[in-house]
Protein backbone atom coordinates (compact mmCIF):
# COMPACT_ATOMS: atom_id res chain seq x y z
CA UNK A 1 0.00 0.00 0.00
CA UNK A 2 1.09 3.56 -0.70
CA UNK A 3 -1.19 5.31 1.76
CA UNK A 4 0.05 8.81 2.77
CA UNK A 5 2.61 8.76 -0.05
CA UNK A 6 2.73 11.88 -2.21
CA UNK A 7 3.73 10.99 -5.75
CA UNK A 8 4.44 13.44 -8.59
CA UNK A 9 3.84 12.25 -12.15
CA UNK A 10 5.08 14.66 -14.78
CA UNK A 11 3.32 13.57 -17.96
CA UNK A 12 0.43 12.23 -15.89
CA UNK A 13 -2.31 13.66 -18.13
CA UNK A 14 -2.04 10.95 -20.80
CA UNK A 15 -1.01 7.42 -21.71
CA UNK A 16 1.41 5.62 -19.41
CA UNK A 17 1.57 8.50 -16.91
CA UNK A 18 -2.21 8.66 -16.56
CA UNK A 19 -2.47 4.89 -16.17
CA UNK A 20 0.30 5.00 -13.54
CA UNK A 21 -1.66 7.66 -11.65
CA UNK A 22 -4.76 5.42 -11.69
CA UNK A 23 -2.87 2.42 -10.36
CA UNK A 24 -1.07 4.46 -7.68
CA UNK A 25 -4.38 5.88 -6.49
CA UNK A 26 -5.66 2.30 -6.32
CA UNK A 27 -2.80 1.64 -3.86
CA UNK A 28 -3.87 4.59 -1.71
CA UNK A 29 -1.36 7.23 -2.90
CA UNK A 30 -1.98 10.92 -3.33
CA UNK A 31 -0.85 11.97 -6.83
CA UNK A 32 0.04 15.29 -8.37
CA UNK A 33 -0.04 15.12 -12.16
CA UNK A 34 1.56 17.74 -14.38
CA UNK A 35 1.81 18.54 -18.07
CA UNK A 36 1.79 21.53 -20.43
CA UNK A 37 -1.88 21.75 -21.33
CA UNK A 38 -3.99 23.12 -18.45
CA UNK A 39 -7.14 21.72 -20.04
CA UNK A 40 -5.70 18.22 -20.46
CA UNK A 41 -4.17 17.98 -17.01
CA UNK A 42 -7.24 19.36 -15.23
CA UNK A 43 -9.51 16.99 -17.13
CA UNK A 44 -7.27 14.04 -16.22
CA UNK A 45 -7.23 15.04 -12.53
CA UNK A 46 -11.02 15.29 -12.52
CA UNK A 47 -11.19 11.79 -13.97
CA UNK A 48 -8.78 10.48 -11.32
CA UNK A 49 -10.85 11.87 -8.44
CA UNK A 50 -10.12 13.37 -5.03
CA UNK A 51 -6.71 11.71 -4.50
CA UNK A 52 -5.37 13.63 -7.54
CA UNK A 53 -4.45 17.25 -8.09
CA UNK A 54 -2.93 18.93 -11.13
CA UNK A 55 -0.42 21.61 -12.06
CA UNK A 56 0.70 22.86 -15.45
CA UNK A 57 4.35 22.52 -16.32
CA UNK A 58 6.55 22.56 -19.41
CA UNK A 59 9.64 20.53 -18.54
CA UNK A 60 11.67 22.20 -21.29
CA UNK A 61 11.64 25.48 -19.33
CA UNK A 62 14.19 25.17 -16.53
CA UNK A 63 12.78 28.01 -14.39
CA UNK A 64 9.31 26.48 -14.57
CA UNK A 65 10.60 23.13 -13.34
CA UNK A 66 12.43 24.79 -10.43
CA UNK A 67 9.32 26.80 -9.44
CA UNK A 68 7.14 23.70 -9.80
CA UNK A 69 9.07 21.74 -7.16
CA UNK A 70 9.28 24.77 -4.84
CA UNK A 71 5.49 24.84 -4.98
CA UNK A 72 5.05 21.06 -4.52
CA UNK A 73 7.39 20.90 -1.51
CA UNK A 74 8.34 17.60 0.15
CA UNK A 75 7.15 14.47 -1.62
CA UNK A 76 7.85 10.73 -1.79
CA UNK A 77 8.27 9.54 -5.38
CA UNK A 78 8.81 11.14 -8.79
CA UNK A 79 7.78 9.66 -12.14
CA UNK A 80 8.69 11.50 -15.35
CA UNK A 81 6.79 10.09 -18.31
CA UNK A 82 6.50 13.47 -20.07
CA UNK A 83 7.72 13.43 -23.65
CA UNK A 84 6.76 14.45 -27.12
CA UNK A 85 8.73 12.41 -29.59
CA UNK A 86 9.20 12.21 -33.34
CA UNK A 87 11.20 10.28 -35.87
CA UNK A 88 12.42 10.44 -39.43
CA UNK A 89 15.31 9.54 -41.70
CA UNK A 90 18.59 10.92 -40.35
CA UNK A 91 19.68 12.76 -43.50
CA UNK A 92 16.28 14.41 -43.92
CA UNK A 93 15.68 15.43 -40.32
CA UNK A 94 16.25 19.10 -39.60
CA UNK A 95 18.85 19.64 -36.90
CA UNK A 96 16.38 21.86 -35.03
CA UNK A 97 13.93 18.96 -34.84
CA UNK A 98 16.63 16.71 -33.44
CA UNK A 99 17.49 19.34 -30.83
CA UNK A 100 13.82 19.65 -29.90
CA UNK A 101 13.73 15.93 -29.13
CA UNK A 102 16.65 16.32 -26.74
CA UNK A 103 15.08 19.47 -25.23
CA UNK A 104 11.83 17.70 -24.54
CA UNK A 105 12.74 14.17 -23.55
CA UNK A 106 16.32 14.41 -22.26
CA UNK A 107 16.59 17.90 -20.78
CA UNK A 108 13.03 17.71 -19.46
CA UNK A 109 13.90 14.63 -17.40
CA UNK A 110 17.27 16.13 -16.42
CA UNK A 111 15.59 19.27 -15.00
CA UNK A 112 12.93 17.19 -13.23
CA UNK A 113 15.57 15.02 -11.51
CA UNK A 114 17.78 18.00 -10.69
CA UNK A 115 15.10 20.21 -9.12
CA UNK A 116 12.90 17.40 -7.76
CA UNK A 117 15.59 15.43 -5.90
CA UNK A 118 16.16 18.01 -3.12
CA UNK A 119 12.47 17.70 -2.13
CA UNK A 120 12.31 13.89 -2.24
CA UNK A 121 12.15 11.69 0.82
CA UNK A 122 15.43 9.73 1.32
CA UNK A 123 13.26 6.59 1.13
CA UNK A 124 11.82 7.81 -2.16
CA UNK A 125 12.49 7.11 -5.81
CA UNK A 126 12.73 8.63 -9.25
CA UNK A 127 11.49 6.75 -12.32
CA UNK A 128 12.68 8.06 -15.68
CA UNK A 129 11.58 6.97 -19.16
CA UNK A 130 13.83 5.62 -21.90
CA UNK A 131 12.52 3.45 -24.77
CA UNK A 132 13.15 0.37 -26.89
CA UNK A 133 14.81 2.23 -29.80
CA UNK A 134 17.83 2.86 -27.56
CA UNK A 135 18.41 -0.91 -27.41
CA UNK A 136 17.03 -2.11 -30.74
CA UNK A 137 18.14 0.12 -33.59
CA UNK A 138 15.31 1.07 -35.91
CA UNK A 139 15.42 3.02 -39.15
CA UNK A 140 14.02 6.50 -38.51
CA UNK A 141 14.82 6.50 -34.80
CA UNK A 142 18.45 7.60 -34.74
CA UNK A 143 17.87 10.70 -32.61
CA UNK A 144 15.18 9.23 -30.37
CA UNK A 145 17.42 6.21 -29.77
CA UNK A 146 20.24 8.53 -28.73
CA UNK A 147 17.90 10.50 -26.43
CA UNK A 148 16.66 7.30 -24.79
CA UNK A 149 20.18 5.94 -24.33
CA UNK A 150 21.18 9.26 -22.74
CA UNK A 151 18.25 9.08 -20.30
CA UNK A 152 19.15 5.51 -19.28
CA UNK A 153 22.77 6.48 -18.70
CA UNK A 154 21.81 9.59 -16.73
CA UNK A 155 19.43 7.60 -14.54
CA UNK A 156 21.95 4.88 -13.75
CA UNK A 157 24.60 7.37 -12.67
CA UNK A 158 22.03 9.28 -10.61
CA UNK A 159 21.25 6.04 -8.77
CA UNK A 160 24.79 6.37 -7.37
CA UNK A 161 24.88 10.13 -6.91
CA UNK A 162 21.43 10.63 -5.38
CA UNK A 163 21.50 7.53 -3.15
CA UNK A 164 19.76 6.63 -0.89
CA UNK A 165 17.05 7.96 -3.22
CA UNK A 166 16.55 5.17 -5.74
CA UNK A 167 16.63 5.98 -9.44
CA UNK A 168 15.32 3.57 -12.08
CA UNK A 169 14.50 3.75 -15.75
CA UNK A 170 11.59 2.15 -17.59
CA UNK A 171 12.19 1.31 -21.23
CA UNK A 172 8.86 0.65 -22.95
CA UNK A 173 8.49 -1.15 -26.23
CA UNK A 174 5.69 -0.25 -28.64
CA UNK A 175 2.75 0.77 -26.46
CA UNK A 176 -0.73 1.75 -27.64
CA UNK A 177 -1.12 5.26 -26.17
CA UNK A 178 -2.39 8.66 -27.35
CA UNK A 179 1.22 9.48 -28.34
CA UNK A 180 0.32 8.18 -31.82
CA UNK A 181 -3.09 9.87 -32.00
CA UNK A 182 -1.89 12.06 -34.88
CA UNK A 183 -1.53 8.93 -37.05
CA UNK A 184 -4.67 7.99 -39.01
CA UNK A 185 -6.48 5.25 -37.09
CA UNK A 186 -6.13 2.65 -39.84
CA UNK A 187 -2.38 3.21 -40.17
CA UNK A 188 -2.05 2.95 -36.41
CA UNK A 189 -3.98 -0.31 -36.30
CA UNK A 190 -1.82 -1.69 -39.14
CA UNK A 191 1.36 -0.66 -37.32
CA UNK A 192 0.26 -2.28 -34.07
CA UNK A 193 -0.78 -5.48 -35.89
CA UNK A 194 2.52 -5.66 -37.80
CA UNK A 195 4.74 -4.96 -34.80
CA UNK A 196 2.65 -6.98 -32.36
CA UNK A 197 2.54 -9.99 -34.69
CA UNK A 198 6.35 -10.25 -34.65
CA UNK A 199 6.65 -10.15 -30.86
CA UNK A 200 6.77 -13.30 -28.73
CA UNK A 201 3.69 -12.03 -26.84
CA UNK A 202 1.82 -11.41 -30.15
CA UNK A 203 0.57 -7.95 -29.26
CA UNK A 204 1.78 -4.42 -28.61
CA UNK A 205 1.72 -3.13 -25.05
CA UNK A 206 -0.95 -1.28 -23.16
CA UNK A 207 -0.32 1.70 -20.90
CA UNK A 208 -1.33 -0.48 -17.93
CA UNK A 209 1.46 -2.98 -18.71
CA UNK A 210 4.05 -0.24 -18.26
CA UNK A 211 2.28 1.38 -15.31
CA UNK A 212 2.53 -1.92 -13.40
CA UNK A 213 6.30 -1.82 -13.89
CA UNK A 214 6.45 1.73 -12.54
CA UNK A 215 4.57 0.58 -9.43
CA UNK A 216 7.05 -2.25 -9.00
CA UNK A 217 10.00 0.17 -9.16
CA UNK A 218 8.36 2.54 -6.68
CA UNK A 219 7.47 -0.22 -4.23
CA UNK A 220 10.57 -2.44 -4.28
CA UNK A 221 13.12 -0.70 -2.05
CA UNK A 222 15.90 -3.08 -3.16
CA UNK A 223 15.83 -1.98 -6.82
CA UNK A 224 17.91 0.94 -8.05
CA UNK A 225 19.89 1.75 -11.19
CA UNK A 226 17.78 -0.69 -13.16
CA UNK A 227 16.64 -0.28 -16.74
CA UNK A 228 13.40 -2.23 -16.77
CA UNK A 229 12.46 -3.33 -20.29
CA UNK A 230 8.71 -3.66 -20.77
CA UNK A 231 8.53 -4.59 -24.42
CA UNK A 232 6.88 -8.00 -24.94
CA UNK A 233 10.16 -9.59 -25.97
CA UNK A 234 10.97 -6.97 -28.64
CA UNK A 235 14.69 -7.14 -27.92
CA UNK A 236 14.72 -10.86 -28.74
CA UNK A 237 13.36 -10.37 -32.25
N1 LIG B 1 4.00 4.81 -26.38
C1 LIG B 1 5.09 4.16 -26.78
O1 LIG B 1 5.05 3.32 -27.71
C2 LIG B 1 6.41 4.43 -26.12
C3 LIG B 1 7.53 3.68 -26.53
C4 LIG B 1 8.76 3.91 -25.92
C5 LIG B 1 8.88 4.89 -24.95
N2 LIG B 1 7.78 5.60 -24.59
C6 LIG B 1 7.97 6.65 -23.57
O2 LIG B 1 7.03 6.51 -22.52
C7 LIG B 1 6.75 7.81 -21.97
C8 LIG B 1 5.24 8.03 -21.93
O3 LIG B 1 4.74 7.96 -23.27
P1 LIG B 1 3.19 7.88 -23.62
O4 LIG B 1 3.07 6.99 -24.80
O5 LIG B 1 2.41 7.63 -22.40
O6 LIG B 1 2.95 9.39 -24.15
P2 LIG B 1 1.65 10.31 -24.20
O7 LIG B 1 0.38 9.52 -24.06
O8 LIG B 1 1.82 11.18 -25.42
O9 LIG B 1 1.82 11.22 -22.90
C9 LIG B 1 2.88 12.11 -22.80
C10 LIG B 1 2.58 13.09 -21.69
O10 LIG B 1 3.65 14.01 -21.58
C11 LIG B 1 3.15 15.35 -21.51
N3 LIG B 1 4.22 16.20 -22.03
C12 LIG B 1 4.81 16.17 -23.25
N4 LIG B 1 5.79 17.07 -23.33
C13 LIG B 1 5.82 17.70 -22.11
C14 LIG B 1 6.61 18.72 -21.56
N5 LIG B 1 7.59 19.33 -22.27
N6 LIG B 1 6.38 19.13 -20.29
C15 LIG B 1 5.40 18.54 -19.55
N7 LIG B 1 4.62 17.56 -20.01
C16 LIG B 1 4.83 17.15 -21.29
C17 LIG B 1 1.84 15.31 -22.31
O11 LIG B 1 0.86 16.25 -21.94
P3 LIG B 1 0.79 17.79 -22.53
O12 LIG B 1 0.59 17.65 -24.00
O13 LIG B 1 -0.35 18.39 -21.77
O14 LIG B 1 2.11 18.40 -22.17
C18 LIG B 1 1.33 13.93 -21.89
O15 LIG B 1 0.69 14.00 -20.63
C19 LIG B 1 7.51 8.80 -22.86
O16 LIG B 1 8.76 9.07 -22.29
C20 LIG B 1 7.69 8.03 -24.14
O17 LIG B 1 8.79 8.50 -24.93
C21 LIG B 1 6.55 5.41 -25.14
Image (cartoon, helix red, strand yellow):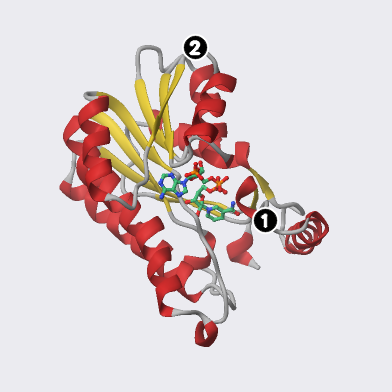
Residue at the spot x=73%, y=62% of the render? Answer: 195
Q: Which residue is mark 2?
A: 50
Q: Is residue 13 above or below residue 25?
A: below
> Image quadrant of residue 26?
top right
> Image quadrant of residue 33?
top left
* Total labels drawn: 2
Tag 1, which secondary structure?
loop
Residue furthest front as drawn: 39
Q: Is residue 72 left or right of residue 175?
A: left
In this view of the protein, can residue 153 be seen by the observer? yes
Q: Residues within 10 Å of mark 2 (few under 14, many from 20)?
A: few
**What quarter of the picture does the N terminus occupy?**
top left
Q: Is residue 223 left or right of residue 231?
A: left
Residue 159 picture location, percent across and down: 25, 47
Q: Is residue 133 left or right of residue 4?
A: right
Q: Nearer the viewer, residue 51 or 182?
A: 182
Q: Which residue is mark 1?
A: 182
Q: Which mark is residue 224?
A: none
Tag 2, which secondary structure?
loop
Dot 2 and dot 1 residues touching (CB under 8 Å) = no
Q: Nearer the viewer, residue 78 or 10?
A: 10
Residue furthest bottom as drawn: 91
Which of the two labelled residues, at mark 2 and mark 1, occupies the earlier sequence position?
Answer: 2
Residue at the spot x=62%, y=61% of the render? Answer: 234
Residue 115 picture location, percent across and down: 21, 41
**Mark 2 to mark 1: distance in Å?**
31 Å
**What quarter of the picture does the C terminus occupy?**
bottom right
Amino acid sequence: MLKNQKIVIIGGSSGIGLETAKQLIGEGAEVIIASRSAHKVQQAAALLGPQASSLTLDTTVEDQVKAFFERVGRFDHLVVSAAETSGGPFLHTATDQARLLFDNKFWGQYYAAKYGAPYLSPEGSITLFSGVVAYKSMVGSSVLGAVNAAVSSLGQTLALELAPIRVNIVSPGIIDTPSRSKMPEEARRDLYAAVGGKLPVKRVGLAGDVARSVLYLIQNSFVTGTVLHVEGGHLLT
